[in-house]
Image (cartoon, helix red, strand yellow):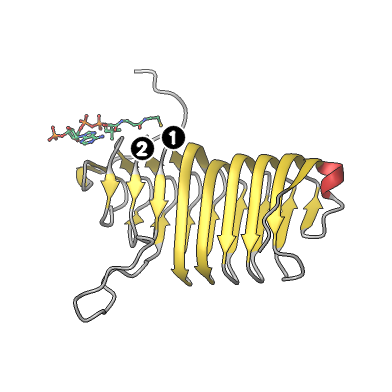
Amino acid sequence: MKKYFRYIKDTLSCRFCRQFSLQGSTINWITYNISPNKNNSVIIENSKVSHCSFNVNGTNNKIVIKNNADVAFHGITIEGDNNEVVYDGCLAVISVRIRGNGCKVSVGKGSLIDESSSIVCMGQSNYVDIGEGCMFAENVEIWDSDTHLITDLMGCPINPSKPVVIENHVWLGKGVKVMKGVTIGHNSVVGMGSIVTKDIPQHSIAAGNPAKVVKNGVDWKFGFIDI
Ligand SMILES: CC(C)(COP(=O)(O)OP(=O)(O)OC[C@H]1O[C@@H](n2cnc3c(N)ncnc32)[C@H](O)[C@@H]1OP(=O)(O)O)[C@@H](O)C(=O)NCCC(=O)NCCS
């Protein structure tokens, strides 16, 4: 397929692009390359999108940005069919890559995802679900797949892709990496540079590589520390 990106400078010019549906939103410098006539759509409602790129190659894919979401310096790449990305009232500066079918990446209300963070979602009906009120520092990576297949000597797959769930109000420190199949319980904290390979319970602090629980019975707050 011939690849070329189209540039849109502002809200007004975005209104003329068939793949985009805008309602009460502000657009500022986006580029896109979306397979035409294949029921792919970008729905932006009451939100702000600036300096973003949308690259969609496949059929029946949907990107929804809604409820005062503020999405900037951001790239979404989707390859496959029936995939979905939903940003619901969050503030996100990330890159999202989906390769598969029926996959979904969602970020919930009030979640704040800092620069250079990325989410990779691959497989069949796989998903990354980020809850409400989460805070990710810079360079956080979420991988719900190893991206390449490993087999046993009989050729049977041994590393299937598996969903990642980050429950509400989870703080991931700078450079945290979350691997396939992990659920991080609500109100928990993961320490700087940790690699999370197993579930982390709610209200706990986990740290290290692989991340282990180092404290239980904790909570955390947005805003800067003053002690
Ligand atoms: C996770 C964190 C918040 C925990 O702070 P804390 O509750 O004061 O924890 P402590 O310093 O008492 O450490 C508890 C244990 O975890 C270990 N630990 C803490 N952070 C760790 C990390 N990032 N990696 C590996 N081990 C870590 C400590 O060595 C200590 O181990 P010990 O019990 O064997 O002595 C803090 O260590 C951290 O990572 N802060 C950085 C957060 C960040 O990324 N901020 C960027 C802006 S959002």
> Which element type, helix, strand or loop, lies under badge 2?
loop
Residue 115: percent from the left, percent from the top?
Answer: 50, 35
In which quadrant of this rendering is ligand 1 seen? top left
- Which amino acid type corresponds to the residue marked 2 in the rendered image? Gly
Residue 166: percent from the left, percent from the top?
Answer: 41, 53
Q: Which residue is drawn at 72% across and 57% down?
A: 43
Q: Residue 138 carries which label?
A: 1
- Which amino acid type corresponds to the residue marked 1 in the rendered image? Glu
Is the C-beta of the residue carrying label 1 under 8 Å from the nearest atom of ligand 1?
Answer: yes
Label 2 Cα neighbours within 10 Å, binned few <14 / some 14-19 / many ≥20: some
Label 1 Cα neighbours within 10 Å, binned few <14 / some 14-19 / many ≥20: many
Q: Which of marks 2 and 1 is nearer the N terminus?
A: 1
Residue 85 picture quarter: bottom right
Pointer 2: what residue?
175
Q: Do the residues under discs 2 and 1 have CB atoms within 8 angstroms? A: yes
Is the C-beta of the residue carrying label 2 under 8 Å from the nearest atom of ligand 1?
Answer: yes
Compared with residue 145, is residue 178 higher up or lower down, i.e. above or below? above
Compared with residue 99, is residue 117 higher up or lower down, i.e. above or below? above
Quadrant holding the N terminus: bottom right
> Which element type, helix, strand or loop, lies under badge 1?
loop
Residue 25 picture quarter: top right
Q: Is residue 126 visible?
A: no
Q: Can residue 213 be seen in this view?
A: yes
